[in-house]
């Protein structure tokens, strides 16, 4: 009697944890002390669904963990392929404060 083999489901993708996803996207290295991009991925996945803070990243939650598939990582990369380098609003340069003359300054100018 031959052992029954279970067929592999079609279309099953490879899923990555947040750390593995950052390495896969090229944001971080495989070094455990390199946390680059992990907060960005988590924050992007947890954006409000109404789009008020930007479109949320496609993601999957499995067993209480945030996971990203190959196709989801491709969508995230496409969303941010030419993202601007600078974030936030444009700030104007501050002008130095003009010192108002005081009565003592007027006396010094008169004696000089």
Image (cartoon, rainbow, N blue to C red):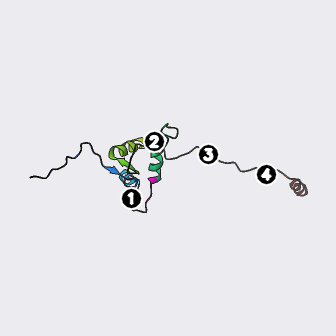
Mark 4 neighbour density, 10 Å: few (under 14) some (14–19) many (20 or more)? few
Circle 1/circle 4 CB separation < 8 Å: no
Q: Mark 1 sits on what residue?
A: 29
The residue sitting at 33% across, 49% down in the picture is: 15
Report the residue at 49% width, 43% height from top.
47
Q: Secondary structure at mark 1?
A: loop
Precedes in sequence: disc 2 or disc 3: 2
Is label 2 in contact with label 1 (beta carbons under 8 Å)? no
Give how far across and how far down residue 56 sits, in percent. Answer: 45, 41
Give the residue pinned by disc 2. 56
Residue at image mark 4: 99
State how far apart marks 2 and 1 are (Cα): 24 Å
Look at the image and tell me in which quarter the C terminus lies: bottom right
What residue span does the magenta drawing correspond to?
30-38
Residue 46 in view, yes or no: yes
Q: Which marked residue is nearer to the observer: mark 2 or mark 1?
A: 2
Of labels 1 and 4, earlier in sequence is 1
Residues at marks 2 and 3, CA–CA distance in whole angstroms: 27 Å
56 or 110, which is in the foreground? 56
């Amino acid at each position: 009697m031959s052992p029954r083999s279970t067929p592999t489901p079609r279309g099953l993708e490879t899923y990555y944890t947040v750390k593995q996803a950052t390495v896969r996207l090229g944001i971080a290295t495989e070094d455990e002390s390199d946390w680059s991009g992990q907060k960005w991925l988590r924050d992007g996945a947890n954006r409000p669904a109404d789009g008020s803070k930007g479109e949320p990243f496609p993601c999957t939650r499995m067993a209480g963990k945030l996971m990203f598939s190959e196709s989801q990582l491709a969508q995230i990369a496409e969303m941010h392929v030419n993202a601007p380098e600078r974030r936030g609003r444009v700030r104007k340069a501050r002008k130095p404060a003009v010192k108002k003359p005081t009565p003592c300054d007027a006396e010094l100018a008169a004696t000089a």
